[in-house]
């Protein structure tokens, strides 16, 4: 089933907010603890699902689990974000320094996989979403983002050799998530928007295509930032859906992607949903729905992951306006 087929199968209009961080606060936990404890992670997700009745239930993930499984040292911060404190390829081009340990040897991967298994046992009427970082973003964590961008110009052959290894690992982690019960996958490739469209086509497109060829559940590619110039090449990925940030021209993106590819977004997670009033969220959502009323491939969604402090009334306003 593709993402658009899933959307059409629902009895109400599909809407998506990426993540469920407000559930951590609802459950009474701190963000760092939830990243390190399976039971508290699951309790936080279920608290969010009970309070807001989302169409897709996202578990709580970080962006560095895959990097940890390849030898990076990762630290969970108090905010719940993850920092790579040791980058295996941060100062040299010796690809043998990547440590291809079994995924279950990565504590972060193991905790997330166990959360998916438990959630899929508890949630039966809607998909539980897994999450993976895209090959380019994982490579940036192993190399260092600034250094990776330099290598994309000066040593693209070496970068491609890293991307090949990383893509294999990301696919392995993806398939383990599905085995644990994930019925939806969020593929997050935030580093992609830092490349020019030409560089994206060379250093991102082939690896995303290889990844998407292995996904057997509904999914979308989420890419942060201003990707208006990238929509043409994003259409070439063959993704079931493209999830974009708040500054993207949605009507243009819908037209370029075509009717078979879902375009998801772009209600601002850091703007209206976090800082606005419920009335502002309702108005923003209504205006987007009206603007995209002729696009059968549009799925209203948050522009990025929602924060812990997103007001409950704002999330109610978003879901309520879509469902109304």
Image: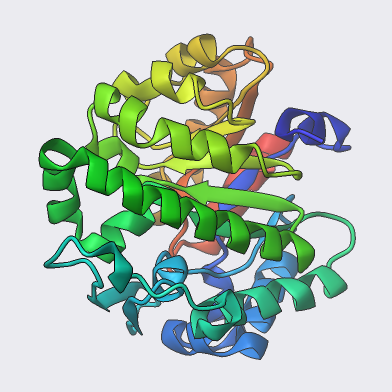
Residue 26 percent location from the top left of the image: 59, 79
Location of the N terminus by quadrant is: top right
Q: Nearer the viewer, residue 178 or 253?
A: 178
* Residue 258 is at least partly visible in this image: yes
- Report the side of 115 relative to 287 (left or right): right
Protein image colouring: rainbow
Name the residue: 48% across, 14% down: 251
Residue 54 percent location from the top left of the image: 71, 54
- Report the side of 1 relative to 260 (left or right): right
Location of the C terminus by quadrant is: top right
Residue 81 percent location from the top left of the image: 36, 72
Q: Nearer the viewer, residue 99 or 222?
A: 99
Name the residue: 80% across, 29% down: 5
Q: Measured along the vertical axis of the image, is residue 39 above or below residue 255? A: below
Name the residue: 56% across, 70% down: 60
- Report the side of 112 relative to 271 (left or right): right
Q: Nearer the viewer, residue 260 or 69?
A: 69
């Amino acid at each position: 089933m593709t993402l658009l087929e899933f959307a059409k199968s629902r009895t109400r209009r599909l809407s998506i907010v990426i993540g469920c961080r407000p559930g951590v606060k609802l459950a009474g936990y701190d963000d760092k603890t939830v990243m390190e404890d399976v039971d508290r992670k699951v309790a936080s997700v279920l608290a969010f699902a009970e309070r807001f009745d989302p169409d897709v239930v996202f578990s709580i993930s970080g962006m560095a689990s895959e990097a940890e499984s390849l030898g990076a040292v990762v630290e969970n911060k108090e905010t719940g974000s993850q920092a790579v404190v040791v980058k295996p390829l941060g100062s040299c081009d010796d690809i043998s320094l990547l440590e291809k340990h079994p995924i279950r040897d990565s504590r972060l991967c193991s905790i997330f996989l166990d959360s998916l298994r438990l959630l899929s046992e508890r949630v039966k009427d809607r998909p539980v979403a897994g999450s993976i970082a895209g090959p380019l973003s994982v490579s940036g964590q192993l190399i260092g983002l600034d250094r990776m961008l330099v290598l994309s110009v000066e040593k693209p052959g070496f970068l491609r050799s890293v991307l090949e290894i990383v893509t294999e690992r990301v696919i392995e982690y993806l398939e383990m998530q599905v085995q644990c019960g994930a019925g939806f996958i969020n593929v997050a490739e935030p580093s992609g928007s830092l490349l020019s469209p030409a560089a994206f086509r060379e250093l991102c497109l082939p690896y995303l295509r290889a990844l998407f060829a292995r996904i057997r559940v509904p999914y979308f590619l989420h890419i942060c930032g201003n990707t208006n110039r990238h929509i043409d090449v994003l259409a070439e990925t063959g993704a079931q859906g493209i999830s974009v940030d708040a500054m993207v021209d949605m009507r243009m993106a819908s037209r370029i992607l075509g009717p078979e590819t879902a375009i998801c977004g772009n209600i601002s997670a850091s703007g209206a949903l976090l800082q606005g009033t419920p009335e502002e969220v309702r108005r923003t959502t209504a205006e987007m729905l009206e603007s995209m009323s002729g696009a059968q491939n549009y799925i209203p969604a948050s522009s990025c992951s929602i924060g812990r402090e997103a007001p409950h009334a704002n999330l109610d306003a978003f879901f309520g306006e879509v469902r109304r």
